[in-house]
Amino acid sequence: MININDINKKFGKLEVLKNVNLSCNKGECIALIGPNGCGKTTLIKSILGMVLPDKGVITFNGKSIHREYLYREKIGYMPQIGRYPDNMSIGQVIDMIKQIRNTNQELDEDLLKAFELEKMADKKMRTLSGGTTQKVSATLAFLFNPDVLILDEPTAGLDPLAAEILKDKIIKEKEKGKLILITSHLLSELDDLITELIFMQEGKVLFHKKIAELKEETHEHKISKAIAKILKRTKDEPDN
Amino acid sequence: MKIILLAYFLSLSVLCEARIILVGKNLPLKTIKAAIAQSTDGDTIIVSNGIYKEGRILINKKIVLIGKNFPVLDGQNKSEVLSVNADNVVVKGFKIINSGHAALEDPCGIRVYDKSNVIIENNILDNNFFGIYIQNSKNCIIKNNTVKAYGEEEQLIGNGIHCWKSENLQIIANKISGHRDGIYFEFVTNSVIWRNVSSGNVRYGLHFMFSNDDAYITNIFKNNGAGVAVMFTKNVKMFNNYFEENWGDSAYGLLLKEIADSYIFNNRFSRNTSGIYMEGTSRIKVEKNVFKSNGWGMKIQASCMDNEIVNNNYLKNTFDISTNGSLVLNTFNSNYWDKYEGYDLDKNGIGDVPYHPLSLFAVLTETNPSAMLLYRSFMITLLDKSEKVLPSITPDNFVDNTPLMKSLPL
Amino acid sequence: MNRIIKIILLDIIKNKIVLAYTFILAILSWSSFALEDNSAKGLLTILNVILFTVPLVSILFSTIYLYNSSEFIELLLSQPVKRLKIWLSLFTGLSSSMVFSFFVGAGIPLLINSPDNVGFMMIIVGCLISVIFVALAFLSSILTRDKAKGIGIAIMIWLYFALLFDGIVLFLLFQFADYPIENAMIGITALSPIDLARIQILLHLDVSAMMGYTGAIFKDFFGTTTGLIVSFLLLCLWAIIPFFISLKKFNRKDL
């Protein structure tokens, strides 16, 4: 569904993405993990067309996304830190996005109800806590029933209850056969969600494996431990 | 009873003496020349409608020549049309066209030679080299004539009403356009120019040279090369005139050059490049005039002295006053300047702060005309404001100490 | 397109600054017309507003607004909306609200108090200047990510066109007073939208002076129909080119 071929991106002298190659398909739930500043968010923004790669091609359903915008109808994006116009209320932001999308398809308002956002629809965005802002972001990402969900640190800042609601929702969507791309530091949270794992470091994809494969390879049941093992192995390799 | 009868017979005898001679295409007498030849002093010749191409018609008797329904006297571009060479002649109601165009002879529509008490009234003069030419004459009246020509260059056209070396003339209610000078006075004294409209002339609407003790009152000078030029003259009174839209290079509403002891009162100068331009002018009083929407309200050259500028309104001019030197020998008092920004704490109608009508930028453009490019830019406004507060380049005695707070009802 | 412009316009209207700007313009214009029995002072006030206030408010407000709507731009970009559409909608929204403010605040008093050539010319030129400085704001805000820097650039641009440029021209005029530089000067005015605007108004406001010998040089160029068309085209270019450059940069910008 999404193919990333040989993507490079530099911010000034800093190389953020180095020859990244990935392909993500329908029905997969991929975790994109790696240390801070490894280029996860840049990669996601490249897929969304917010960051324009210096080199390489990203295709969505076989079509290059360069200078395209309509493919974004099929993506729901939840940013790491949602930034919204300060003087708009929750209701206004949601209405605005609805207006811009202007679709007549049925809206998925599960999260809107689950997070009880309708009750505080009049609250201005600048008065919201980080967690509530994340709730708005999540709601917006799922609202239009997109084929692809890109969630950047979805559970950071959410209280456990809300995080649980969101996780349930993700699982539900996964079961519908959607492609879900999640970045997160908290590996334990992802255990029961993900089917694949991408590990990035210093702008490179270190590995891209199915969870089953991974567990088998490392003989570990917990993903976090499996990763730690692999990392250790790769670290040791140069020494050998 | 006897006296009345006597008077009756007397008047009859006068009437008998003064015959009326009729001229017309369908009458026994077909030409004006023939009629004049038949006439004697005091006769009246009445000319019917028609076109008369008789070359130069010379009036050498004291007769009254009246046109009915504007008979046309056509000079056929060859000669002077009507020459008056007798006293007490009246010429009335003709349309006089196509005098020749010659540089040496100055052919005219109507010309009066060295005579007095001639009346020229209600004529239409069209396409003549000179319109009406009064030469060395006295006590003449030129009234209600329309004088029109189509001049484009100064050298190729004469003046509308040209008066030379005459006195006691009355030039009243004429309309002059398209000539070199609308009205031209040279060595003319004790005369009055009243209620004329002089517009669209190539050079001046009215031109005075060496003509003392005259007055021009309630005239309109519009859209001429320059409005009025008064030169080398004394004692001229200029009242109630309109000077409008005299635009162009060196165009002025009123040009004063080497004149003295005159009085400019209650005139209106609007939309001229310069309202009044003064050079070598002394002892003139400029009072109760309105200067509105001119490029320069007044340009007073440094050669002017002892002039008094009192109680005028300066409205919407680009520059109210400009000068070319730093010497100020003229006085400004109690004028209304719309650019004045002072205050009046004691409420006596007179601003408490003196007004300096000469702006820095007026001085700058005088030395460097291209600077006009920057006029009204914020930069220039700032410079001008600071100059008003602390005069450094402009002469600080160029000042109206009693500026009015409200415009005068003129 | 319309939906986004509508959203932006609503947001700008909610922003009290534009309303305050309109209100202040209106008070200035009405009071200066009411102060005197002739319209000269009112016209001069509005001229100074056009040459000074309108550029300042247009460029400053637009720059700040653009920086403040970076979240909004980011949000829109994650939605299926073209970049061109976002930028153009912002431009349309900002310039139309600036033009509207100028028209309501200064244009209406002009139409009522001076419904002649001068008045119309001032309205047209004031609207153009509003749009031009909105376009320059787009340029200054795309040049740097830093809000403080961007506002600094905006103020510098304004200062340059409102004040410094004329200073340079004045200096050149007197430095080269002995040479025939009139034609070159006409060319130089094309380098400043404020000067172009000012000269067009001047030709109508000070028509008598401009008909004389000092103004003749400019009258011969700017006063003709060709000159009029050329200067309006130049003014339009002053709006189009900065916006176009900013659009190019925005299309390549990483958010």
Image (cartoon, rainbow, N blue to C red):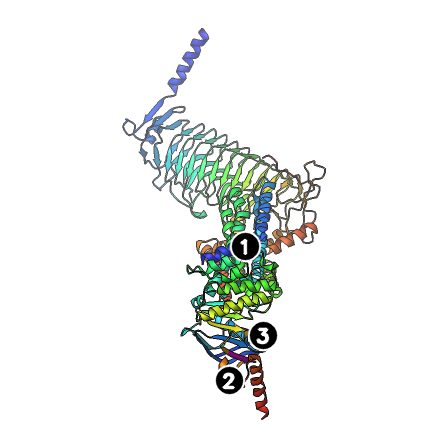
Q: Main secondary structure of the magenta part?
A: strand
Residue type of the residue flagged with mark 2? Glu
Q: Position of residue C243 (x, y in %)?
A: 50, 63
The segment highlighted magenta reads: A197-203
Q: Chain of mark 2?
A: A
B120 w.r.t. A216: above or below: above
Which callout, 3 or 2, points to the residue nearer the camera? 2
Q: Which residue is mark 2?
A: A216
Residues at discs 2 and 1 both on one chain: no
Give the structural element (helix, strand or loop) at label 3: loop
Q: Nearer the viewer, residue C49 or C85?
A: C85
Please give the residue where the numbered disc 3 appears in the rendered image.
A186
Label 1 residue SS: helix
**Residue C233 location, x and y as percent?**
46, 58
Query: In the displayed structure, does residue C117 sit left or right of residue B378?
Result: left
- Badge 1 amino acid: Ile
Frontmost residue, C230 versus B110:
C230
In three-dimensional space, the C-alpha distance between marks 2 and 1, rounded to whole angstroms, equals 58 Å
- First in sequence, mark 3 or 2: give its number: 3
* Side (left or right) of A20 relative to B33: right
In this view of the protein, which residue sits in the foreground, A49 or A174?
A174
A224 lies above or below C253 = below
Q: Which residue is mark 1?
A: C12
- Around disc 2, counting alpha carbons within 10 Å, would you say few (fewer than 14), some (14 to 19), or many (20 or more)? few
Q: Is residue C195 left or right of residue B104?
A: right
- Which amino acid is tagged 3? Leu
Q: Which mark is residue B34?
A: none
Name the chain under label 1.
C
- In the picture, which quadrant includes the N terminus of chain C? bottom left
Q: Residue at x 69, y 50 (%)?
A: B389
Q: CA distance from mark 3 to mark 2?
A: 21 Å
